[in-house]
Amino acid sequence: MGQPNDEDRVTAAVLIIGDEILSGRTQDTNLRDIARYLGVLGVDLAEARTVPDVMDEIVDALNALRARYDYVITTGGIGPTHDDITADAIAQAFGVELYEHPEIIAMMAARWGGELNAARRRMARVPVGGELVKNPVQGPPGFTIGNVFTLAGVPSIMRGMLEDVGPRLRGGRPTVSRTVRVEGSGEGVIAAPLEAVAKAHPDMSLGSYPFYGDGGFGSNLVLRGRDPEQLIAVVGELIAALKGAGIDNVREIDVA
Amino acid sequence: MGQPNDEDRVTAAVLIIGDEILSGRTQDTNLRDIARYLGVLGVDLAEARTVPDVMDEIVDALNALRARYDYVITTGGIGPTHDDITADAIAQAFGVELYEHPEIIAMMAARWGGELNAARRRMARVPVGGELVKNPVQGPPGFTIGNVFTLAGVPSIMRGMLEDVGPRLRGGRPTVSRTVRVEGSGEGVIAAPLEAVAKAHPDMSLGSYPFYGDGGFGSNLVLRGRDPEQLIAVVGELIAALKGAGIDNVREIDVA
């Protein structure tokens, strides 16, 4: 896999904000969804961090990530309660103030009328210099400032907001992948031929993901690269190398 | 949530290692499981990071986290294939060499005999000064060096290894454990009697760690608690409950 400073590589980091993830109360799924979404666009997710709802922790992690990667996507902490401090932390990281965005106030007034209380108004706060990220699901929008996109933590809302993030990203070349399935052989046997093929193609990523279960055992070998023709050739090379090592139950599979 | 420097707070970080998490191919669940496990022990999970299978990324993240928190738990990258470089990275972070641990080699020789090839021997490598972390499920053990615990990425194996981490943590209340092995019955059959015994003893932890492979299938049931006498009694209770449910191939085992 390439390094962050490869010229044609576009990188992103995810910053997951929330005590509920670190306590184990909530199972995060946003990281996987963002990774898949970015992968299709050719943007490599290079790192992820999870931090608690603590101002300095969010600010420090955000500053480290936004300096290093092309984009940062944050999830969580933009609701109406006192522990939702993501907007405050992002404003502090960028050294700007928060203000009540008139479009969000207008949306909220239409929705809530006289019930537009102080807690709800918290969700209208956007850093000065920021722009909105549309929320096609429910509730107020997210926002973006600099190379940072700030999205909701609720998975369905987060996924909806992502649709308004993609078009703003400078896309890298999408990577393509293929999967070779080996059944009835363990990684200990697969490792040598796999490594030989991986070493011959350092610009590609070859990973081995073992499975066990009622249906037997084996490993899915995932090949990823940027050149579709090279990928097809290397799939053939890998299958030949496996068969040459006496591993016969091998085939390419479609991974939906 | 307290700050990392609160005197009576014991903190931990999780370092998730693997391209497959950052590509979105695999949904991580280890973070949540570790968070819950540590929570029961009174250890606060304060941060988590996910990094790719790239040496410098692993080393830098590990050094940042182990300097800041009382403990670091890593998951992933300890298999036999070329992209499994976690042991190398941890040795580099600590400035020590790797060596083939004689206990692991002996276990592997017993299991694999003449098939103990170079790829499998990779999994016997432990940093100089490290100690083993027991693996009650299948495959070689993990290891610990300094304040770092290095566990497998496969969730069932990771959870099993965690059972040998808790007793070594400061602030983790001392616990004792015993293991009951069920062969030839799946978790679907074991679940009901196991749950009944677990509900009768809410102050104890009962985990099920299924195994599959050449040697058949079944599950190791790990019981953990603070009172050794109670533990012995509950082991008897569990075995009786399993047999009462028609599950006969059950025995207490020593986990080496």
Image (cartoon, coloured by chain):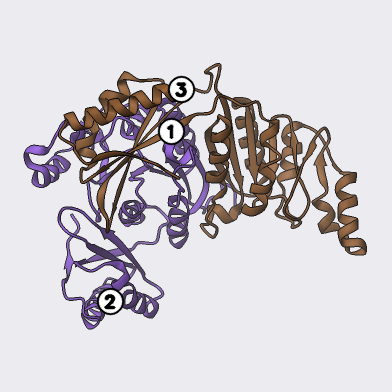
Chain colours: A brown, B purple
Q: How many marks?
A: 3
Q: Which mark is residue A227?
A: 3
Badge 2 element: helix
Q: Is residue A27 left or right of residue A237?
A: right
Q: Is residue A186 left or right of residue A137?
A: left
- Compared to residue B93, the image places residue B179 above or below, namely below
Q: Nearer the viewer, residue A97 or B156?
A: B156
The residue under the point 43% across, 60% down is B41
Marked residue chain, label 1: A
In the picture as drawn, the residue positioned furthest to the right comes out as: A114
Badge 1 element: strand
Q: Where in the figure is residue A134, as x and y percent of width and height?
A: 76, 44
Image quarter of the C terminus of chain A: top left
Label 1 crowd bin: few (<14), some (14–19), many (20+), radius 10 Å: many
Disc 3 marks which amino acid? Answer: Asp
Q: CA distance from mark 1 to mark 3?
A: 10 Å
Disc 1 marks which amino acid? Answer: Ser
Q: Which mark is residue B234?
A: 2
Q: Nearer the viewer, residue A243 or A123?
A: A243
Instruction: Say whether residue B167 is visible.
Output: yes
User: Quadrant of the rendered structure where residue A231 is?
Assistant: top left
- For the residues beneath circles 3 and 2, the answer to whether they share a chain is no
Disc 2 marks which amino acid? Answer: Val
Q: Nearer the viewer, mark 3 or mark 2?
A: 3
Badge 3 element: loop
Image quarter of the N terminus of chain A: top left
In the picture as drawn, the residue positioned furthest to the top comes out as: A7
- Compared to residue A175, the image places residue B74 above or below, namely below
Marked residue chain, label 2: B
Identify the residue position indicated by label 1 in the image. A177
The residue under the point 22% across, 76% down is B239
